[in-house]
Image (tube, helix red, strand yellow):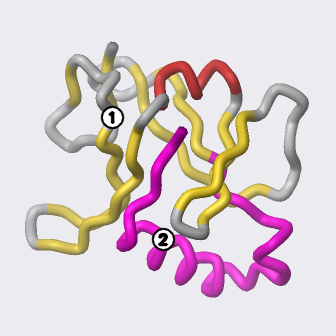
């Protein structure tokens, strides 16, 4: 399962409206893990409306989240959150599987 905090839900909803996504029921938040960043792995977020055969689909807090099977292995029980505070603004992941994260919080290693 991938969880979505209340603040992340609000921001996702706002971004979908800003992106002029017509039917929010057809679109979902695609979360993936890609190679890169100072710790070796980075998170990637996109809006998508095409599922792939091996996708893992979740819905939490009113947000449909989809990830590929390989990324899901890194994301099990992760919470997507959003911060708009003075220490940084943007989405971040609370990932219990990460053994190390970088200072900016955008990459991790296991």
The spot of residue 73 in percent (x, y) is: 54, 19
The spot of residue 30 in percent (x, y) is: 65, 48
Which residue is more in the foreground, 38 or 55?
55
- Total tally of numbered discs in the picture: 2
Q: Is residue 94 left or right of residue 32?
A: left
Q: Is residue 49 left or right of residue 65?
A: right
Q: Residue at x 67, y 59 (%)?
A: 64
Quarter-of-image position of residue 52: top right
Magenta segment boundaries in residue numbering: 1-30
Mark 1 burial class by Cα count in 10 Å: few <14, some 14-19, many 20+: some
Quarter of the image that includes the N terminus: top right
Q: Are marks 2 and 1 in contact (CB under 8 Å)?
A: no
Which dot marks residue 9? 2
Q: Is residue 74 left or right of residue 106?
A: right
Mark 2 burial class by Cα count in 10 Å: few <14, some 14-19, many 20+: some
For marks 2 and 1, the one nearer the N-term is: 2
Quarter-of-image position of residue 15: bottom right
Q: Which residue is mark 1?
A: 95
Q: Residue at x 73, y 85 (%)?
A: 20
Q: Residue at x 67, y 79 (%)?
A: 19
């Amino acid at each position: 399962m991938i969880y979505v905090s209340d603040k992340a839900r609000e921001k996702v909803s706002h971004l979908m409206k800003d992106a002029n996504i017509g039917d929010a029921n057809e679109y979902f938040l695609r979360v993936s893990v890609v190679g890169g960043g100072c710790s070796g792995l980075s998170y990637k977020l996109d809006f998508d409306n095409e599922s792939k055969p091996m996708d893992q689909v979740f819905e939490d807090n009113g947000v449909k989240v989809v990830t590929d099977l390989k990324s899901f292995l890194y994301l099990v029980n992760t919470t997507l959150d959003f911060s708009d505070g003075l220490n940084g603004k943007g989405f971040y992941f609370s990932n219990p599987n990460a053994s190390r994260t970088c200072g900016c919080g955008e990459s991790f290693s296991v």
